[in-house]
Image (cartoon, helix red, strand yellow):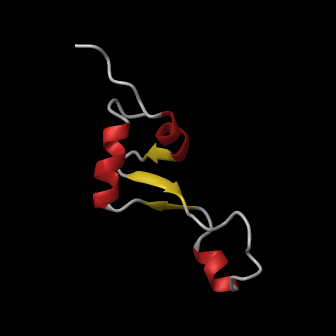
Amino acid sequence: MPKLKTKSGAKKRFKITATGLLKAGVAGKRHRLIGHNGKYIRQNRGTKVMSQSDAKTIRSYMPYGL
């Protein structure tokens, strides 16, 4: 069988934690931040762990992990 390719968009956007969970940057932080209140900006700082249903799809994009 040939090797499977990793989706290059997925390897740029997601990381696998030491416990095997997937983490990603939070959406909505690039522009139009004046329209959001301070609580929204603070809560979306940093990265978040992906839900299990999303993680299942993302894992299929990265067959050998990262």
Q: Position of residue 3 (x, y in %)?
A: 32, 17
Eyeballing the image, is 44 above or below 38? above
For this orientation, the residue located farthest to the top is 1
Q: Position of residue 6 (x, y in %)?
A: 41, 30
In this view, the residue in front, 48 or 7, is 7
Residue under the image location 37 percent in, 34 percent down: 65
Left/right of residue 34 with respect to residue 16 in the rendered view: right
Residue under the image location 69 percent in, 86 percent down: 37
Residue under the image location 36 percent in, 51 percent down: 21
For this orientation, the residue located farthest to the right is 34
Left/right of residue 19 with respect to residue 9 in the rendered view: left
Eyeballing the image, is 29 above or below 23? below
Which image quadrant for residue 59? top left
Left/right of residue 57 with respect to residue 12 in the rendered view: left
Q: Position of residue 52 (x, y in %)?
A: 29, 59
Q: How many marks?
A: 0
The answer to whether one can see residue 62 in this image is yes
Which image quadrant for residue 34? bottom right
Eyeballing the image, is 32 above or below 6? below
